[in-house]
Amino acid sequence: GAVVSQHPSRVICKSGTSVKIECRSLDFQATTMFWYRQFPKKSLMLMATSNEGSKATYEQGVEKDKFLINHASLTLSTLTVTSAHPEDSSFYICSASLAGVTDTQYFGPGTRLTVL
Amino acid sequence: KQEVTQIPAALSVPEGENLVLNCSFTDSAIYNLQWFRQDPGKGLTSLLLIQSSQREQTSGRLNASLDKSSGRSTLYIAASQPGDSATYLCAVRGWDTGNQFYFGTGTSLTVIP
């Protein structure tokens, strides 16, 4: 089956630094990838939709300059949290859709970000 | 904007019991609905996908139903096991939102041995 990986699985950083999270579709091409954020005991909140080769579409209330998304290839999307602050600490999950097959999203295992 | 709610927020049952998780959504014009399982600190595992034209889907001990007109879906788990303990999320996808899913608030299930 389709597999999506995320790296790193867990990261701790100091306030003010930037952190990059990678999302890869391992055995399929993903024209669209999604980035979600999940707060403790809360549901997933869609942050942005990323289409290969074009700018990401951000949801209302999500700061584009703070959460930089790049989808440079059909198998890789990255989320960079710039100038991280403790309130950015969260669980970030990506998902990917098969090119031409839009019924199913495959989710990555998530990345736990802790900003000290 | 689509809003998805799940009731109850938490549920604790003894092993062997059958149980029902509920999901409601405000906009009935959905493309499909999907149930996921999430273990603590982990990503999502897809359990069942119901297309808008379908009424239910079954996989093993799991059965999911969909009533679009009333904006409801249920996930039925038969003969629950301790390994079923996890958070269950439902998510709906609309016709005009591309691949975007709107997630419910989740139900945290604990099955007591």
Image (cartoon, coloured by chain):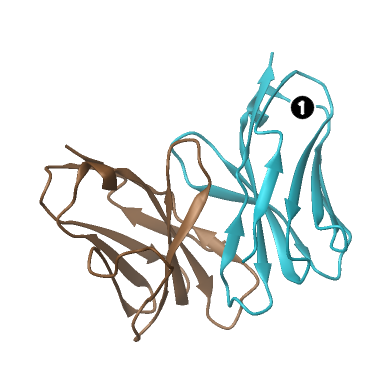
Chain colours: A brown, B cyan
Query: Would you call the spot at circle 1 few (<14 residues within 10 Å), some (14-19), or many (20 or more)?
Result: many
Q: Quadrant of the C terminus of chain A?
A: top left
Q: Quadrant of the N terminus of chain A?
A: bottom right
Identified by mark 1, the residue type is Ser
Q: Position of residue B113 (x, y in %)?
A: 69, 13
Q: Is residue B13 left or right of residue A73?
A: right
Can residue B79 be seen at all in this image of the molecule? yes
Circle 1 is placed at which residue position? Answer: B80
Which image quarter: residue A19? bottom left
Residue A48 vs residue A103, the one in the foreground: A48
Q: Position of residue B5 (x, y in %)?
A: 68, 47
Can residue A29 be seen at all in this image of the molecule? no
Query: Where is B55 relative to A27, above or below?
Result: above
Which image quarter: residue A101? bottom right
Q: Is residue A90 left or right of residue A34?
A: left
Identity of the residue drawn at 72% across and 60% down: B33
Query: Where is A108 relative to B16, above or below?
Result: below
Identity of the residue drawn at 76% across and 18% down: B15
Query: Where is A3 relative to B63, above or below?
Result: below
Q: Position of residue A111 (x, y in %)?
A: 34, 48
